[in-house]
Image (cartoon, grey):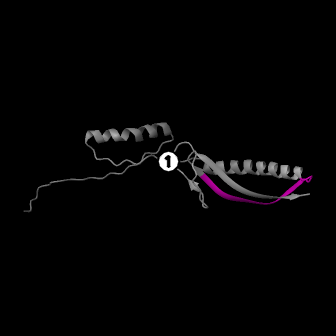
Amino acid sequence: METNELLDYTAYIRFEIKSSDVKLISQLAKNASALLGQGLDLASYGPNYYINNVEQLKLDLLGEATRNGRLRAEQFAKNSNKHVGALKYASQGIFQITAPNSTELSGYGVYDTSTIRKNIMLVVSLNFAIH
């Protein structure tokens, strides 16, 4: 039998909170389950944590990796009674942001947003002249 009576009503709302206060966001995510006890049907997804200055970090890591690569080349050369010359070739490989202790790898790089703490890795290839 048809009626004009409303039997059920469902409303969906999706919202996003953005803040640089990661501790506050973490606390809000943990407290979201308290709404379930108040009769709300809630689907809560964990927060995503992003790095604001990724491009600057890449530049810093490139500089550090290049210095470290030269030191390694000098050690190879020293052990062979040679000297390191000019940098002939350099390229940047994958850039990965992973959770601590992660074993995740990708040829395209990884950007994990599930944790506040992160490990950042940048691969570079350097080719020096040896004399």
Q: Quadrant of residue 86?
A: bottom right
Q: Is 50 situated above or below 107?
A: above
> For this rendering, which residue is in front, 53 or 31?
31
Q: Is the magenta stretch mostly helix, strand or loop?
A: strand
Q: As drawn, is 26 to the left or to the right of 124?
A: left
Q: Where is residue 41 in the image (x, y as percent from the top left)?
A: 28, 47
Q: Residue at x 46, y 37 (%)?
A: 24
The quarter of the rendered structure image containing the N terminus is: bottom left
Q: Which residue is drawn at 10% across and 58% down?
A: 4
Residue 80 makes an appearance in the image: yes
Q: In this view, does 22 lie to the left or right of 37?
A: right
Q: Return the x and y of residue 91 as percentages of the image width and height.
A: 73, 60
State the residue position of label 1: 114
Q: In the figure, is residue 92 to the left or right of 54?
A: right
Q: What residue type is labelled 1?
A: Ser
Residue 93 part of the magenta-drawn span: yes
